[in-house]
Image (cartoon, rainbow, N blue to C red):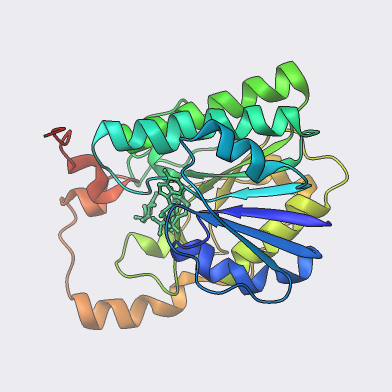
Amino acid sequence: MKRLLITGAAGALGRAMRTRLAPLAETLRLSDISDLGTASENEELVQCDLGDADAVHRLVEGCDGIVHLGGISVEDKFSKILNANLLGLFNLYEAARANGHPRILFASSNHTVGFYRQDQHIDATAPMRPDGLYGVSKCFGEALARMYFEKFGQETALVRIGSCMEKPSNHRMLATWMSYDDFRSMIECIFRAPMLGCPIIWGVSNNDSRWWDNSHAAYLGWKPKDNAEHFRAELDATLGKQDPAAPLNVYQGGNFVKDPIFPET
Ligand code: NAI
Ligand code: 15L
């Protein structure tokens, strides 16, 4: 690619992907509402609010791929989710439509299906069961992307990320964890694929514990290599015996199922 846009580049995943994705494009355009630090040689930095349509149109201009990580990433006030995750996503898709439909990776979430139990095994055809307004915003994002695919041929990978971080921090994440390196290799497969379409892809490593079936997306050739199981002994030692009846250990969305609706004031 000539220019790859990464939104949410100041966030946890954005910072982890910034150097890892550099080989994928001549230029990385990095964007966030927060400060992005100093640009290195192959980087362009653009600070803007995803809720600002004009700014997002300028942001997408000249890009031939988008890794969309920007937005509210946990349960929050609806007004904040509305601006970043709903309006922001609409702005991004309209900007993509006006700029030649660059391929998009949408960072969706396991919280689209958070109310499934951990003893249920599901694939991409399972009905959504969001566990909060944040999860609902990701369901909206997936539906919006699908509509732009059906209507305009806009390709998007709908990546339902589990828990993408350095290492799992609780026993639930033995099933939901995705390593940074596996996320990087997934992104590479998504942008290299001759034909993408609009698949749902579960963003998890090659963990022994698994709830989600990615076989429908095998055509992308993504083969995650890491396995959360290596951290089990460390989690047992630090966290001790688990309560099997606690939401963290019952629901796929873990403690997100307990989040309240946050008041606006
Ligand atoms: P994060 O919260 O660390 O990063 C999100 C970034 O988006 C932040 O830097 C924030 O400043 C930016 N942002 C928020 N509102 C904005 C707005 N109105 N305009 C422009 N930028 C805005 O989240 P993280 O962990 O890096 O996740 C990245 C994406 O992946 C998010 O969309 C999140 O929902 C999704 N995801 C992440 C998972 C994980 O395990 N890290 C799991 C599932 C989904
Ligand atoms: C998410 O969607 C969140 O963005 C992230 O912070 C993690 O909590 C992750 O899900 C998870 O379920 O572990």
Residue 20's x, y, as percent? 65, 72
Asked if 141 appears above or below 216 in the picture, the reply is: above
- Identify the residue at image location x=49%, y=38%: 122
Q: Residue at x 38, y 70 (%)?
A: 168
Q: Nearer the viewer, residue 155 or 39?
A: 39
Q: Among all residues in the image, which is located at the extreme right?
A: 194
Q: Position of residue 229 (x, y in %)?
A: 45, 73
Residue 207 visible somewhere in the drawing = no
Q: Nearer the viewer, residue 169 or 144?
A: 144
Q: Residue at x 55, y 24 (%)?
A: 143
Name the residue located 29 percent from the left edge and 77 percent from the top edge.
235
Count of residue discs = 0
Horizontally, residue 264 falls left or right of residue 172, namely left
- Left or right? Give the position of 57 relative to 212: right
x and y percentages locating residue 212 in the rendered image: 51, 46
Is 225 situated above or below 80? below
Whether 224 is drawn above or below 235: the answer is above
The quadrant where residue 152 appears: top right
| Location of residue 80 (image quadrant) | top left
Q: Quadrant of the N terminus?
A: bottom right
Left or right: residue 264 versus residue 101 is left
The quadrant the C terminus occupies is top left
On the question of residue 177 being in view, the answer is yes
Q: Please state which of residues 248 and 211 is positioned toward the viewer in this rendering.
A: 248
Q: Nearer the viewer, residue 159 or 44?
A: 44
The percent coordinates of residue 221 (x first, y second) are 78, 55
